Structure formats: structure tokens, C-alpha cells
Amino acid sequence: MRFCATVLTLYPEMFPGHLGQSLAGRAIERGDVEIAPVNIRDYANDKHRSVDDTPAGGGAGMVLKPDVLAAAIDAVSPDGDTRPRLLMSPRGKPLTQARVRDLADGPGVVIVCGRFEGVDQRVIEARNLEEVSVGDYVLSGGEPAALVLLDAVIRVLPGVMGNAASGTHESFETGLLEHPHYTRPQVFEGREIPAVLISGNHKAIDAWREAQSRALTRARRPDLLELTDPLPDRKPDQVAK
Ligand code: SAH
């Protein structure tokens, strides 16, 4: 199935950006993924092609006009389009690997990239936009956030990652951060690869990795251990206590 992302932006030339390279680039070339940037300014309705105006109530910055944005959304996502409509926003629900997998299971996304101070609240409500954040910091525009979201979604689409097994043990997939990795040389600047990893004892290796994962998660992200709602693909014995 083709995954179709339509991205509403004032900077269409920012797409596909880095997604034109490597694994995502090949998925686009194969036609498994389509990334269609659309310029919000094409839907401006005055002779100056304005897309923003001053905030009601005063204050700094500008706000994206609801009429222009609604026209752009209606043009790319008419009634019957089942794709979720996302608005990249620092106020949104933080993006998680579970939501990424959920989006990857669907037909695609319509993504609105904010600019300036943000978007008029009425278009968020009237067009049912789901606000999604990529972290607790403020970017100057939604474009890099959209690229982050699409990167995460595309890499879990069927057939995108070369080795299908890679991915399932990664950070967040089990509810834990991933264990450390090592490769040759055997000794690097006096530091050895942990002996268990070259023991050939796969049970011992699995146990070591699991213990490392738990210790790292406890030290860096104790909040993950408290998560009560397990990811859909988590096996019961992997659920963090
Ligand atoms: N005044 C807003 C910030 C606007 S930043 C506030 O304080 O909440 C301009 C645009 O960048 C936003 O409309 C949004 O589309 C994007 N953006 C900024 N930070 C983001 C984040 N952490 N996640 C997703 N999008 C973000």
C-alpha cells in the first residue's frame, strides 16, 4: 500500500529534504511513499497573497489566517479522505513510537506546518486538526517537526528497512531504552567489548542486554517504566514493571 503524505507549508522547497536520501529516498523512488508539499500561499485570497495577520488581543508576531488555511486543507483533503490531519505544534500531544506505528498502518497523513506564532484556533477546531509535538522546545516552524514525524513513520513501513528484524528491539519498541552496541575492533583505545557479547551464549547475551536496557531506562527515563499502557506490539513478558 502506498503511504501518501500531503504537507501544507509556506516552504514547500523544504520537502522531501533529507527524506529524499537513503532508506526513505528509496521508498519514494519505488513509489511506496509519496510526499506532496503544497504551498499554503497558493490559497491566499487577496492581491498581496497574504497568509498571516496580527493577533487578536494584541501582542507580538503574526497568526496564520484560518480562511486561507481552511481553503488549502479542503483542496488537498476533501470529504472522504480518511487520512488523519495533523498540526505540528509544541502544544500538541508528544509523538510516541506507538503513534508512529499507528500512523504507518494507515493510508497516509495530511500535515499542517505552522509558522509565526501559530495558527488561528478556529481552523484547528473546524478542520479537526490533531496537534502533535516533537518535543518540549520551540522550533521556528513546523517543517522540521513534519520531517521528523515522516522519518519515523517511513522507517517502519513494510519493506523500508533492509533487515526486518532490526527495529523490533529498538528504544521504545519494548517500552525500554535500547542496550549499548559494540562492533570490531575487539579493543578500542584500551576498552574491550564486554566478554559476554563474544561468549556465544545467546541466553546470557539476551539477559545482559535486558539488564542493560532496564538499568539505562531507570537512570535516564524512569517515566518510561511507569507507563501503564503497553505498546500494542509489546509482549507481556517485556512490559516494564
Ligand atoms: N507561539 C507558539 C510557538 C510557535 S512556533 C507557542 O508558544 O506555542 C511556530 C511553529 O513551529 C508552530 O506553529 C509549529 O507548527 C512549529 N513548532 C514549533 N515547535 C514545535 C514542536 N516542539 N513540535 C511541533 N511543531 C513545532
Image (tube, helix red, strand yellow):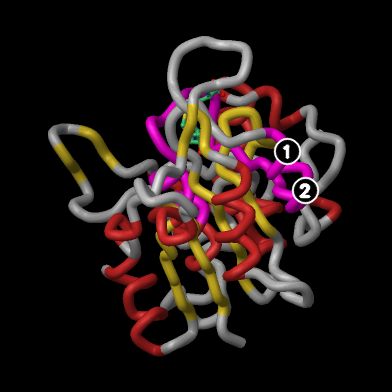
Image side of residue 220 versus residue 234, left or right = left
- Residue 18 in view in this figure: no
**Whole-percent x, y for residue 236 in the image:** 85, 53
- Residue type highlighted by circle 1: Arg
- The answer to which of 205 and 122 lies nearer the viewer is 122
The residue lying at 34 percent from left, 64 percent from top is 16
Which residue position holds label 2?
A: 126
Image side of residue 4 versus residue 24, left or right = right
**Whole-percent x, y for residue 108 in the image:** 62, 71
Q: In the rendered view, tell whether residue 11 sits above or below residue 219.
A: below
- Quadrant of the rendered image containing residue 29: bottom left
**Residue 122 — which label?**
1
- Residue type highlighted by circle 2: Ala
- The answer to which of 203 and 102 lies nearer the viewer is 102
- Residue 71 in view in this figure: yes
Image side of residue 150 versus residue 177, left or right = left
Q: Is the residue marked by circle 2 packed among few (<14), some (14-19), or many (20+) residues within 10 Å? A: few
Q: In the rendered view, tell whether residue 198 sits above or below residue 156.
A: above
Looking at the figure, which quarter contains the N terminus?
bottom right
**Residue 234 — which label?**
none
Instruction: Work out which residue is located at the far front of the displayed protein and give it.
Output: 47
Query: Can you tell me whether the CB of the residue at mark 1 lies under 8 Å from the nearest atom of ligand 1?
Result: no
Q: Magenta stretch?
A: 121-149
The residue lying at 77 percent from left, 56 percent from top is 234
Using the numbered discs, state the Cα–Cα distance from disc 1 to disc 2 in whole angstroms.
Answer: 6 Å
Instruction: Work out which residue is located at the far left of the displayed protein and give it.
Output: 189
- Quadrant of the rendered image containing residue 14: bottom left
